[in-house]
Amino acid sequence: LWKPGHIIAESIESIRGKVGTDTVLLGLSGGVDSSVAAALLHKAIGNQLICVFVDNGLLRLGEADQVMATFARHLGIKVIRIDAESRFLEALAGVVDPEAKRKIIGRVFIEVFEEAAAELPNVQWLAQGTIYPDVIESAGGKTGKAQVIKSHHNVGGLPEELNLKLLEPLRELFKDEVRHLGTELGLPFDLVYRHPFPGPGLGVRILGEVKKEYADLLRLADAIFIEELHAHGWYDKVSQAFAVFLPVKSVGVMGDGRCYDFVVALRAVESVDFMTARWAHLPYDFLDHVSRRIINEVSGISRVTYDISGKPPATIEWE
Ligand code: XMP
């Protein structure tokens, strides 16, 4: 029988048994998985947990400040924030291949994280918010049928490089189970029922080369879409929704003149396990409203499209 209370009690016991009086380091992304892992670990070992939050410049609008407010201020968890936007963007300059981008983001993350870890005295463990679908989608998964679908940068790499023991308290759980756990641990509803966000962030939602200009436009468009999904009661009805930046320009008319600006695609899906997904049949009036707002409010974007592809064959993310 699956009960969040049991899982928490068992996990706490197991974490304490393993960790003892050691110090644990966690890379906090602000997504559901690492957030729940942080809350669980904090409950188990309190101040023996130190979180490092890397702002890679590929986060959503206002996200870094929200993470700090929730974890450092409200929950009293020790969080070290590192602003590494320019480092990520420099490493990504000129790179267009999706898997190459993922690898670079993963590598720079490791570098930044290692540097932060080196500053901390006496860390023995590295905790990660790896969940079961990450395990089975990555090479070396425990099913034996694992395929490398995409290299999820939150699996593998770090512990060996850092010479730390690995702690993955959510490794056996599916997303919905992780959410139940988060609720039980007292995390805010909005955070726990937040749509998943990929480790490489906007890096895989900006097609091709990542540029700050593109990330800034995408953040604004995405924030409008998400705000309207909340306002119209759709956010919790879909499993994941976001905007994607297409680095192509199309012609339009704005006022008296011709414009030639970028395109965004909106993606919203319904899914149980994120292995398959159906595109969300959002009402035309709603899409119309969102499209108008984006085009009117985000200067630099003049066309909005809606993605009507299912998974399979299309993945949820565009890269
Ligand atoms: P796809 O695009 O493969 O996505 O259909 C399935 C789910 O996984 C998320 N995703 C990622 N998460 N690192 C992550 O941590 C990644 O590289 C990554 N790629 C996709 C995606 O947002 C969706 O929820």
Image (tube, rainbow, N blue to C red):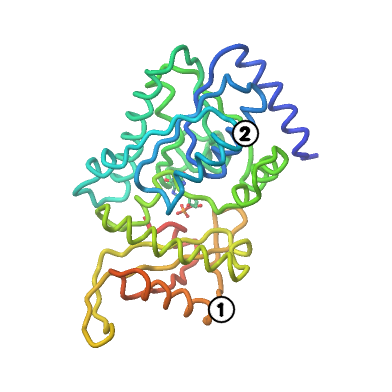
Q: Is residue 102 above or below residue 286?
A: above
- Element at badge 1? loop
Image quadrant in which the N terminus is located: top right
Residue type highlighted by circle 1: Pro
Q: Is residue 83 above or below residue 212?
A: above
The residue at which mark 2 appears reads as 39
Q: Find the distance from the CA under tag 2 to the CA under tag 1.
A: 37 Å
The residue at which mark 1 appears reads as 283
Q: Position of residue 301 (x, y in %)?
A: 31, 70
Residue type highlighted by circle 2: Ala
Mark 2 burial class by Cα count in 10 Å: few <14, some 14-19, many 20+: many
Q: Quadrant of residue 131?
A: top right
Q: Earlier in the sequence, mark 2 or mark 1?
A: 2
Q: Position of residue 270 (x, y in %)?
A: 58, 63
Label number found at residue 188:
none
Residue at 51% x, 42% y is 67
Q: Position of residue 278 (x, y in %)?
A: 55, 66
Image quadrant in which the C terminus is located: bottom left
Numbered-mark total: 2
